[in-house]
Amino acid sequence: MRPLQISPATAQKLAESLKVPLEQIMHMPQHILLAKLAEIQKQEEKDK
């Protein structure tokens, strides 16, 4: 499995918002990352 094709800045923001190490973000399977992003978006919409 190859690392995700995202910018370093995006990876840092994801690591902060998901509260996981940066290395884990870069090696996370894409479908899991997308699911976690969806959870974050739902939480942000709920907080508004």
Image: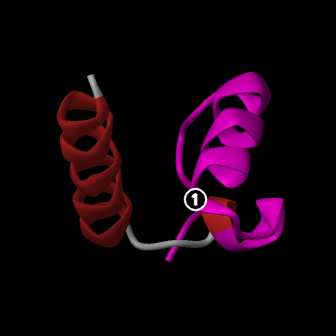
Q: Report the quarter where the C terminus lies.
A: top left
| Magenta-colored stretch includes residue 14 | yes
The picture places residue 30, in percent across and down from the top left corner, at 35, 61
* Element under disc 1: helix
State the extent of the magenta-drawn residues as a range: 1-24
Q: Would you identify the image quadrant in which residue 13 lies?
A: top right
User: What residue is shown with label 1?
Assistant: 18
Q: Would you identify the image quadrant in which residue 8 lies?
A: top right
Residue farthest to the front?
A: 48
The picture places residue 12, in percent across and down from the top left corner, at 77, 39
Q: What scheme was used to colour the molecule? A: secondary structure
Q: Which class describes the residues within 10 Å of circle 1: few (<14), some (14-19), or many (20+)?
A: some
Q: Residue at x 61, y 47 (%)?
A: 17
In the displayed structure, would residue 3 be above or below residue 12?
A: below
42 relative position to 29: left or right: left
Q: Residue at x 49, y 77 (%)?
A: 1
12 relative position to 44: left or right: right
Q: Would you identify the image quadrant in which residue 29 lies?
A: bottom left
The picture places residue 27, in percent across and down from the top left corner, at 62, 71
Along the viewing direction, whichever of 40 and 10 lies nearer the viewer: 40
In the displayed structure, would residue 48 be above or below residue 2?
A: above
Q: What is the three-letter code of the residue carrying label 1?
A: Leu
Q: Residue at x 58, y 59 (%)?
A: 18
